[in-house]
Image: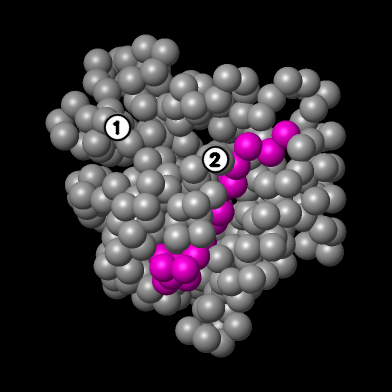
Amino acid sequence: MHDKKRYNDYASVLKTIFPARVQKILVNAGFSCPNRDGTKGRGGCTYCNNQSFSPEYCQAQKSVTQQIEEGIVFFRHKYPAQNYLVYFQAYTNTYGDFQRLKSLYDEALSVQGVRGLVVGTRPDCVNDELLDYFARLSKHNYIMLEYGVESVYNATLAFVNRGHSFADAKKAIRATAERGIYTGAHLILGLPHETREMLLDAADRLNQIPINALKLHQLQIIKGTAMAEQYAEHPEWFHFFEVDEYIDLLVDFLERLRPDMAIERFVSQSLAELLIAPQWGLKNFEFTAKLEKRLRERNTWQGKTW
């Protein structure tokens, strides 16, 4: 654990890699997804509305370089001396022609101050050619592929229209890690029809995969999504955690989680004007403070029962 925290904090892990503070700059390169364009399906994941977490400077009509430079200006006033990681976030950022992908990543790495890439993608949208390219980049840059796992249960993945299986996620993450590339994973806690015990068992399943960093998200219903329509028609399918209930779930989850897996996030925070439920009214740092307090109260820590 870092800085005497009771969980493996990703920000602290980065401090062991970079000499200065690290800031992610989001980039929207205009990608789509195979379950949006008809390759695997239409409409995308039922919970997805990328508008809910994109900053103002992150606009697909701008070049990658322009977005990065505007992002640097946005953050520089607060932290003048820092390193930057370019985060290709919106939709599936490895979905396209290899030469186009390569040109976008190379462009991002050419901007002064950029020390690496974090590329958000799906487990079914990487191949050997692309992974080998990232492996070459990783010899001189910080490279992480951040996979949307979302659930370890295939029935849930089908229900939310992911278009891939948990086996796909395991295969992609292992192939990435074998090449020496950092791996990240997203998991949503509270998707319809998953019980508390299923969510805790998910920690055991993730422990078997070489994941470096994990982002946990509470289920949120966002306006303009297929899930918002489902919620209106079938509210009985959904259970929204109260804050304290979710914190206790996370504590139990952390106890079972491998201690070397860094935690990058515990909650999502969508735009208030787009959020339908749950309405917690907490900032991320406020939630994390409550979680850390509960870990101390229970005298427990990440990996305690692993």
Q: Amino acid at mark 2?
A: His
Question: Residue 79, located in which quarter of the rendered image?
Answer: top right
> Number of marks in the image?
2
Q: Which residue is tagged 1? A: 260
Q: Secondary structure at mark 1?
A: loop
Decide whether residue 125 is among the magenta residues: yes
The residue located at (69%, 63%) in the rendering is 103
Marks 2,1: beta carbons within 8 A: no
Residue lying at the far bottom in this picture: please name it.
38
For residue 232, side relative to residue 169 (left or right): right
The residue located at (37%, 12%) in the rendering is 4
- Magenta residue span: 113-130
The residue located at (51%, 22%) in the rendering is 15
Q: Is residue 255 or residue 230 the one in the foreground?
A: 255
Question: Residue 261, located in which quarter of the rendered image?
Answer: top left
2 or 1: tag closer to the N-terminus? 2
Return the x and y of residue 19 as percentages of the image width and height.
57, 19
Label 1: few (<14), some (14–19) or many (≥20) C-alpha neighbours in 10 Å = some
Question: Residue 61, located in which quarter of the rendered image?
Answer: bottom right
Q: Amino acid at mark 1?
A: Asp
Residue 10: assigned label: none
Task: Inspect this view and state whether residue 53 appears.
Answer: yes
Q: How is the image coloured?
A: one colour
Residue lying at the far left in this picture: please name it.
305
Label 2: few (<14), some (14–19) or many (≥20) C-alpha neighbours in 10 Å = few
Q: Is residue 279 or residue 125 the one in the foreground?
A: 125
Task: Inspect this view and state whether residue 234 appears.
Answer: no
Q: Which residue is tagged 2? A: 140
Q: Secondary structure at mark 2?
A: loop
| Mark 2 to mark 1 CA distance (whole Å) | 24 Å
Quadrant where the N terminus is found in the figure: top left
